[in-house]
Amino acid sequence: MSTPQPRALHQAFLLRPKSERAFVWKYSQAIGGRRPRHFHVEPELNLVVRGTATFAVGDLVAEVSQGELIAFPPAQDHGLIAASPDLYLYAVGLDHAFSAQILGREHPAGLPLHVALEPKEQAKLEDRAGAIVEREGLDSVIAELWERSHALALRAPPRSGRPLHVLTRRTLQLSSTAPELGLDDLARYLRAHPSEVSRHFHRDMGVTLVRYRTRMRLLQFIRQMDSGQKDLMTSASIAGFGSYSQAHRSFWSELGCSPRQFFGDGVREQMQASYL
């Protein structure tokens, strides 16, 4: 059963210089420092080494155990809501363009997945992740880990017993490569009725397609500003908003602040530094 979805924070996965395109974090329940529900532009992959974890993923809940992989695409809100005392996991995140370069057009930003690995493959991934965790300048090594993880995951049956619907998969691909497309345009590309596209997407992702697309535009807005474009109205237009007022409403709806507050009043930094 789904539950009402609370507001999520924007918390970037990559905190390194622009030259850093990939990173591996470790999380231990014994140490703590858990992030609240959040979303970001980078696709993320979690490998559970020990213990169990419960993730909120949109308005869905995912139970993850030792030896399992769970991944979140860009703009997918997620948060660790419960864990066993011995939980230990590795979180791998890549720049969205770097992920597309590694995985190809079939998986332009990393697709959602939740699978169990064979013990031997699990041990290999753990060894690779453990050797590079929280070390900088290892983009090519992390890229190999990212590619191997997805190759294994795509061959394994989903833990839910229900594969990602083809309409959801193709919607995610199109949303990444052509974010300006509206629902009717997406449906025409997919040769399906708009309500069918929306229904499958919400079932698989735990978030409505309208809300997901709004977040994708917000993330594009933020990328534009970070790239040096300091004009808010221009950034809103490039991100696919019909007007600056629409972007303003979306910021308030998703992040609880205006664009000017987000970029100029320290709100972004406060969100980034937030822990439970």
Image (cartoon, helix red, strand yellow):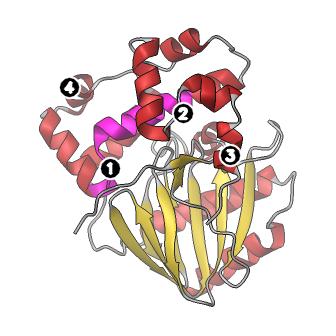
Quadrant in the picture for residue 155 = bottom left
Q: Amino acid at mark 4?
A: Arg
* In the foreground, 32 or 25: 32
Q: Amino acid at mark 1?
A: Val
Dot 3: element: helix
Q: Which mark is residue 207?
A: 1
Question: Which quadrant, please, contains the N terminus?
Answer: bottom left
Tell me the crowding category of disc 2: few under 14, some 14 to 19, or many 20 or more residues within 10 angstroms, Cα based: many
Dot 1: element: loop
Q: Nearer the viewer, mark 4 or mark 1?
A: 1
Q: Which mark is residue 219?
A: 2
Q: CA distance from mark 4 to mark 1?
A: 21 Å
Quadrant in the picture for residue 63 = bottom left
Which residue is label 3 attached to? 270
Q: CA distance from mark 1 to mark 2?
A: 16 Å
Q: Nearer the viewer, mark 3 or mark 2?
A: 3
Dots 1 and 2: beta carbons under 8 Å?
A: no
Find the magenta span and give its range.
Answer: 204-221
Residue 198, x across and y down, in percent: 21, 41
Q: Is residue 19 above or below residue 247?
A: below
Q: Is-magenta flag for residue 171?
A: no
The mark that comes first in sequence, 4 or 1, is 4
Tell me the crowding category of disc 3: few under 14, some 14 to 19, or many 20 or more residues within 10 angstroms, Cα based: few
